[in-house]
Amino acid sequence: MKYKRMKQVDIRPNMTTDELLTSMINGGFTCRKVALATELLEQMILDNSCTVFLGLAGALIPGGMRKILRTMIEKNMVNCIVTTGANISHDLLETSGGSHHHGSENLNDEKLVELQVSRIFNTLIPYDSFVKFEILVQKILKNIPDERMSSQKFLYELGRYVNDPQSIVRAAFLKKVPIFSPSFADSMLGVQTWLFSQTTPLFIDVLKDHSEFTKIIYEAERMGALFLGGGVPKHFIMNGSQLQKGLSYAIQITMDRPEHGGISGASVKEAISWGKVASEAKWIDITSDITLVLPLMVSGVLSRLQD
Amino acid sequence: MKYKRMKQVDIRPNMTTDELLTSMINGGFTCRKVALATELLEQMILDNSCTVFLGLAGALIPGGMRKILRTMIEKNMVNCIVTTGANISHDLLETSGGSHHHGSENLNDEKLVELQVSRIFNTLIPYDSFVKFEILVQKILKNIPDERMSSQKFLYELGRYVNDPQSIVRAAFLKKVPIFSPSFADSMLGVQTWLFSQTTPLFIDVLKDHSEFTKIIYEAERMGALFLGGGVPKHFIMNGSQLQKGLSYAIQITMDRPEHGGISGASVKEAISWGKVASEAKWIDITSDITLVLPLMVSGVLSRLQD
Amino acid sequence: MKYKRMKQVDIRPNMTTDELLTSMINGGFTCRKVALATELLEQMILDNSCTVFLGLAGALIPGGMRKILRTMIEKNMVNCIVTTGANISHDLLETSGGSHHHGSENLNDEKLVELQVSRIFNTLIPYDSFVKFEILVQKILKNIPDERMSSQKFLYELGRYVNDPQSIVRAAFLKKVPIFSPSFADSMLGVQTWLFSQTTPLFIDVLKDHSEFTKIIYEAERMGALFLGGGVPKHFIMNGSQLQKGLSYAIQITMDRPEHGGISGASVKEAISWGKVASEAKWIDITSDITLVLPLMVSGVLSRLQD
Amino acid sequence: MKYKRMKQVDIRPNMTTDELLTSMINGGFTCRKVALATELLEQMILDNSCTVFLGLAGALIPGGMRKILRTMIEKNMVNCIVTTGANISHDLLETSGGSHHHGSENLNDEKLVELQVSRIFNTLIPYDSFVKFEILVQKILKNIPDERMSSQKFLYELGRYVNDPQSIVRAAFLKKVPIFSPSFADSMLGVQTWLFSQTTPLFIDVLKDHSEFTKIIYEAERMGALFLGGGVPKHFIMNGSQLQKGLSYAIQITMDRPEHGGISGASVKEAISWGKVASEAKWIDITSDITLVLPLMVSGVLSRLQD
């Protein structure tokens, strides 16, 4: 039989995450996929001809992924980010002194609304955090040039004025990693920007993002992407990769399902038919909550890149 | 026991969908939920104080829902639509003479890309349909006023020039049902509009959508919503309902899951903690592919509204 | 393009379920699958060379499917049933005067246990129903021959003494449709039988089921199966079909997923590699709650078989 | 706000799995749940008044979990196991010289059946492995006493004659950890036992398992359980815990969903209404593939138990 024999996963006390991943490749189902995806992520980072795109959807910071995303930027693991507005909003909410708290999905939501606490599955946000966020954003916006700009330019300018070493937007600004957010209007940050823009000439031209994104794509020799969730970020990156010869590397982590035809759950394999992923690409799709896979995978890559 | 006794679902030959729904209320799990949701949809339509919002995400037209959505508009079941750009794109693709075809999720995608056929789960689109779509859109865009406008205004103007009685955008134009698409840039239509806008003063100001949407919300005495999928449309409607006293009626149909914290799979119950759904609201969430629930539910409501 | 063009699903007031299914075949995703599965079920019933197997797992009677399952037996839609013990237990619980009630998945379970009410998602059972069930079963068991027998023989004898025209076990007895339950020990009925058997020579030899099931399989010219859920019933039927030339027809309805390798979520396609489903078989797998698909599908088949 | 503030997950190169888990407790969604479950598992193991039950469903050895399960037995992490027959069958298949191989869920199943290779998601088994398994089992069975026995007694006797230090059944025999398999008939091992039993007085009395299991339950001061998947093992353990005062500790890891009412996807919270889990119990349910969670969790517990 041409298929390689499985050796089963082994564990021992005080093993490193890198050793665990090395052993998980001997298993099946999702543990093998995560181990293979770690190898693939390392490979696309080390491939100098590859521009690495990171798609961010869902509630990553309420899931606890803020530091890991910042580390990925600081350690040069990504070259371009496409995100929902929500991820930027939660990043700035933390910067503003607002906070996320540990709760449970089984709390009584009728009571929570009385207590002025918002719930995102098992994470909670007190309403006053939103107020802190709004005050911070309005303060920052006063510094932004009053002009028509893409979401990418806007987020770059924003990053310039976010005085917080913990911030993702700040880290991306410092590392000159562009962040696109084509659905930016539909977020807490979008609402604040709308309020601000009513009395100023500032406005966000999301169509312009296509010009700037297309430029990055045409400059890329090869494209690789790590999709954390689906949504607009996945669709936008794949819309771009279709203009090139398709992604050469792709890793998708999502709990969404393909049966209803939505982009978020669509398999990577399906994207091949569109020319969004190259037929000869290396790719893996993982059905899992991101918060479980990302820490394991990135800690493994960090260990390996050091060597 | 205060809880009502179940009678079990009954069927007979040549029964109507309305009779089936009436019997499904006697079952449990999802069949009961769909029967209750049908009653709830009828109720919010008949409630004259209620503005009915329809959120459209996912691939509804590749799923075969185009006629049903048009019927909902024509029969005055909805007052305001929020959609992804994809739903408008597929609507216009059909208008342009492009086509969707029956395939299978098990087809070989490497072969499909060679045959120039794109796959959305078990539905297929030949590449030449996209060309037809592009020609149509460029033709229509020439008629659109060259100005800064919201996605809502833009889609209204678009509907004016779509000469196709089958079209959803056309039906909404005729019925004066506003369509918002805050993530419009990230779609085939968005890309075409970007290309067109490079040589004209036209541009889409998605922040402006907030002004127009907020106006509708403040004019509504009560709000009800039917969410077909999640994504930006769900988030945008709920962002609005939060400014009011929360939705009084809500029906959500999605296959997405709450465990990863994303808006698409978040439970309606969770939205209560945010004030997006009122504590005293009537609501139901259904875990199912939309294509299975919507035809049954809307055919039931159609029968009942006639009486 | 060789793939058939989609026409979109159409609805109208007072349409029959059969008409809805006929229109749903023009859609995509799950609605098309359910319409195709209805055709396939009719086809395997009309194929005189085909023995039709029905696999029953999950909580079908708490989901409201009791009458529909009985109708399927009475209308000669199935030739052999394999079930978990739970489905028989809930059938007899209803016969005993016990009851299922409409509740909600959001009820407080700590309060329910105080109220002595058990919850199955949105269905409730008061504890005294279990007492009625136990009294009935102990009464019936006194009539069963005191011997070593297969679960199939045992359930046949049970059906003889269930004096309830609504009962599935009774209907199967009358129609001489054998019911196998290889995991019968693990159910409320199994526990009662264990208690009874402690003072009598009665005992259930589940290995013997293999002898009786194998006989049915070898007598079948062709095999078809409708799998409602997975579990032991699916595995047991497929273990049998593997001894023959594999299933010629297969319909699977489940919400379980293939990613973890369990039989319940495994795709029908995977079963081809095992020889459990023939390479040339006609098959469809549907990702949905059964309570939504089964009433629609069986009402459609009933209408068509009448013609 | 009384809810604890989140600190976000942090990673660094060469961190241990124990350190990762300690950091994951600072995140949200599933990563926090896995970190909490690791603490809970350690706690129930260290609680001397607690009998720890392990429920095994699904395809754990094709997923690569054989060594980890054996380690759990050898390191005294479990006191009693309830399993499907499949897990024992795959354990013995490995012992017999048969093998599992790395494949992909996207392989062509029509070709695999020609190549005589069976697929379980992304794991493959060549048909000749089944032959090796059958030869081994028939050889072992000749040593088993020719009498009526429970599945537990049978598996204990089996373990006596499995001459393989890698085997789970062997490890359980040596450690005197009882293994129950109430649905044992429905497995490859069940089929072999049936064939063997046709010419011998051996037979398996699964009702007898209730007697032996009930004894263990009544001897337990407190009960804790780790459910890997659902199915018969989960149902059987919970049927037992209901006879006591309910589980004091429960961890459930499954990808199955609650919406269809089946036991496999039912929430732990639901089990409280049945008295299967105590109202004051400590419990966590995790929606994930087991192969991803178990290695991480058990390597963490191993590290901590050492200290």
Image (tube, coloured by chain):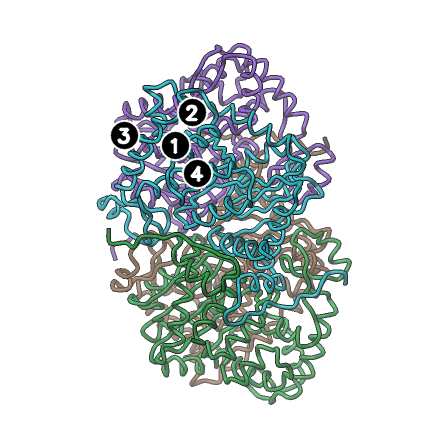
Chain colours: A purple, B cyan, C green, D brown
Name the residue tied to disc 4: B169
Q: Are marks 4 and 2 in contact (CB under 8 Å)?
A: no
Name the element at disc 4.
helix
Q: Are marks 3 and 1 in contact (CB under 8 Å)?
A: no
Q: Nearer the viewer, mark 4 or mark 3?
A: 4
Against B107, residue A239 (above or below) is above
Which of the pair A296/D169 is nearer the observer?
A296
Residue type at mark 4?
Answer: Val
Q: Can marks 3 and 1 be said to lie on one chain?
A: yes
Residue type at mark 1?
Answer: Phe
Name the residue tied to disc 3: A222
Against B210, residue A9 (above or below) is below
Label 1 packing within 10 angstroms: few (<14), some (14-19), many (20+): many
Percent x, y of residue B151: 46, 28
Query: Which sits earlier in the primary sequence, circle 2 or circle 1?
Result: 2
Name the element at disc 2.
strand
Residue B185 visible in this rendered orientation of the protein: yes
Q: Can marks 2 and 1 be said to lie on one chain?
A: yes
Q: Can marks 4 and 3 be said to lie on one chain?
A: no
Q: Nearer the viewer, mark 2 or mark 3?
A: 2
Q: Which mark is residue A180?
A: 2
Q: Which mark is residue A236?
A: 1
**Quarter placement of the C terminus of chain D:** top right
Q: Nearer the viewer, mark 4 or mark 2?
A: 4
